[in-house]
């Protein structure tokens, strides 16, 4: 029995060793490196090993930091609300209103295909749509809704959030659809038989049962938005900032220690959010 | 046929709008990439031509598009194969509890949720401090794996959660060794899901931008090349490139889906081989 025990651990470790190796080399060590460098100092051309709290002092002493972190959380919350609303509705339609499995699979694939194409291309695709002479403005003008093209459609918070919702709603649809498909249909019938209205069934039966899917979707959307720097740069025309942009700017100026300090604070923030969310869901069971 | 409730039509309309929202912009740039030679980045179309596609083939106009495409393609294949092999091994490992499995699982979750610029920055710093040159096939490759492996592993979890262990046990009862049970029973059953893992591995790598930004070195991958173009190219040539790479992605997705479909079909045609074993 004892030998079998060691054997089991050994097999497990042998099988898991390539995964562990990659994660240690390209995840754990880089994080350690960032933490170390965040205490270093920078000259104009190079970075110098040191142990100084200077980068953190500067970070926490600057009002820009708080504004940018606030902005990042604002984006995350708004995008989360929209992706959840849209994602849930789409998943609900697919799971409960589309009747044949063939159609379900076909429509589900149609929703997921953009996930496998380039994010950057999907982002720049909005430009001819939202620009001053873009499709949206021409449509609004010819419909007589406005006389002048709207400037806030592109390069604004509006376009940033629109692009985020466009890119990341899929991450809500897929896990919510997955949990919905596992709901025993007889539970819903039981609710109706018991006299519940459609709305009551939705709020008392379906939504509670979908919670794991909602949590997984939330984890994806929140972390993707909080860690983003490309979407905000493109869609705000560099007029808005989030933490990712702050880090990227420092990197562009070769201020690696300061970039690292910001990165450490961002990582702690993200991990805290995820830690809270993971209390509500056991990911391994829900797949 | 029973009548559908009114909510079906409301939700159906919502779904159609969602698809329009999802695909509309991509179609817009697909149309605009056929702009005439005098056309600009927005409507109206000034004639219809293939001008901007031809422009793509002239190296000096847009930088090293074809070189970066070749690199992205090679990197995609490397990441794909590694992701499939490592995820299957990881998935098999996690079927039984081993010492430290919880720690490893949380590392995988961390890899999934960590802002990608941190991976880029950290790997870049390690390579520069160690005096190693960064290159898409070394540092870029490793950085991308931290994004594709969690997806691969999560798919394997989903697969093994649904896996009926009695097939494997039956094989063992018949005297199969662990390796034989894996090779002749487990792997053939999970094969279609492996195509899914491969699809994730390839496309996530082919489109990955943030994790390769600081780790690709002096030879750009295609997304990095496109990123560079967005800041200095102001002609529809960028739409032509966008349309081509999206079309390429669609072809890849199509190939993967067809493979899964034909595998399932062949399996259905063969039916059960119960009782036909070589005794």
Image (cartoon, coloured by chain):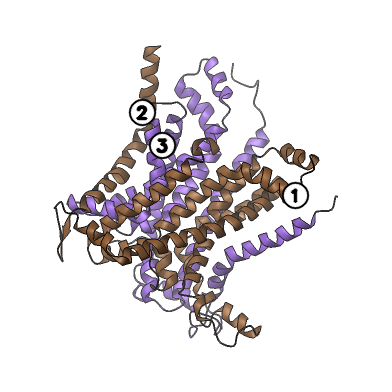
Chain colours: A brown, B purple
Q: Which disc is residue B163 wearing?
A: none
Q: CA distance from mark 1 to mark 3?
A: 39 Å
Residues marked 3 and 2, same chain: no
**Horizontal and vertical percent position of residue B131:** 17, 52
Q: Nearer the viewer, residue A275 or A150?
A: A275
Q: Residue at x 65, y 20 (%)?
A: B275
The quadrant holding residue B14 is: bottom right
Residue under label 2? A13
Vertical order, A271 against A6 (above or below): below
Residues marked 2 and 1, same chain: yes
Q: Residue at x 35, y 23 (%)?
A: A10
Residue under label 3? B105
Q: Which disc is residue A198 wearing?
A: 1
Q: Chain of mark 3?
A: B
**Horizontal and vertical percent position of residue B58:** 38, 74
**Horizontal and vertical percent position of residue A251:** 27, 62
Residues marked 1 and 3, same chain: no
Quadrant containing the C terminus of chain A in the rendered view: top right
- Graded by Cα atoms within 10 Å as few (under 14), some (14 to 19) or many (20 or more), the crowding at tag 3 reads some
Vertical order, B63 against B75 (above or below): below
Q: CA distance from mark 2 to mark 1?
A: 50 Å
* Element type where label 1 sits in the image: helix
């Amino acid at each position: 029995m004892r030998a079998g025990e060691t054997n089991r651990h050994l097999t497990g470790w042998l099988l898991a060793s390539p995964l562990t190796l990659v994660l240690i080399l390209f995840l754990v060590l880089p994080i350690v490196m960032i933490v170390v460098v965040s205490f270093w100092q920078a000259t104009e051309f190079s970075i110098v090993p040191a142990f100084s709290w200077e980068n953190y002092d500067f970070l926490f002493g600057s009002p820009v930091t708080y504004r940018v972190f606030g902005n990042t959380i604002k984006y995350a919350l708004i995008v989360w609300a929209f992706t959840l609303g849209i994602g849930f509705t789409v998943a609900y339609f697919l799971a409960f209103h589309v009747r044949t499995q063939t159609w379900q699979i076909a429509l589900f694939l149609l929703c997921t295909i953009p996930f496998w194409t380039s994010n950057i291309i999907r982002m720049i695709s909005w430009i001819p749509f939202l620009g001053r002479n873009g499709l949206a403005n021409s449509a609004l003008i010819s419909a007589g809704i406005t006389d002048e093209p709207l400037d806030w459609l592109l390069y604004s918070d509006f376009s940033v959030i629109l692009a985020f919702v466009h890119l990341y709603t899929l991450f809500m649809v897929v896990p919510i659809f997955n949990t919905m498909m596992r709901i025993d249909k007889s539970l819903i019938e039981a609710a109706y038989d018991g006299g519940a209205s459609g709305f009551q069934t939705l709020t008392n039966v379906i939504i509670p049962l979908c919670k794991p899917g909602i949590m997984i979707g939330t984890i994806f959307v929140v972390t993707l938005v909080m860690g983003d720097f490309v979407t905000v740069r493109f869609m705000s025309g560099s007029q808005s900032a989030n933490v990712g942009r702050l880090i990227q700017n420092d990197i562009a100026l070769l201020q690696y220690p300061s970039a690292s300090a910001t990165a450490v604070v961002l990582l702690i923030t993200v991990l805290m959010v995820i830690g809270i969310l993971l209390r509500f869901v056991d990911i391994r069971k829900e797949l | 046929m029973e009548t559908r409730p009114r909510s079906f039509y409301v939700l159906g309309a919502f779904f159609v709008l969602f698809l329009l929202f999802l695909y509309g912009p991509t179609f817009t740039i697909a149309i605009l990439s056929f702009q005439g030679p005098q056309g600009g980045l927005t409507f109206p179309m000034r004639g219809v031509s293939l001008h901007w596609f031809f422009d793509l083939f002239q190296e000096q106009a847009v930088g090293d598009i074809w070189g970066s495409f070749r690199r992205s393609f090679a990197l995609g294949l490397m990441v794909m194969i590694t992701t499939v092999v490592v995820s299957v091994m990881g998935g098999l490992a996690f079927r039984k509890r081993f010492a430290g499995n919880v720690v490893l699982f949380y590392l995988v979750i961390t890899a999934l949720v960590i802002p990608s610029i941190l991976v880029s920055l950290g790997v870049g710093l390690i390579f520069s401090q160690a005096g190693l040159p960064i290159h898409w096939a070394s540092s870029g490759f490793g950085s991308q794996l931290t994004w594709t492996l969690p997806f691969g592993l999560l798919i394997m979890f989903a697969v093994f959660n649904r896996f009926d262990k009695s097939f494997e046990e039956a094989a063992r009862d018949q005297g199969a060794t662990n390796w034989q049970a894996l090779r002749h029973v487990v792997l053939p059953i999970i094969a279609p899901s492996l195509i899914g893992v491969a699809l994730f591995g390839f496309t996530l790598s082919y489109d990955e931008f943030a994790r390769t930004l600081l780790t690709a070195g002096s030879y750009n991958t295609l997304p990095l090349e496109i990123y560079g173009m967005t800041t200095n190219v102001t002609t529809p040539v960028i739409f032509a490139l966008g349309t081509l790479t999206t079309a390429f992605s669609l072809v890849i997705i199509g190939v993967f889906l067809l493979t899964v479909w034909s595998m399932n079909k062949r399996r259905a045609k063969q039916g059960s081989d119960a009782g036909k074993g070589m005794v």
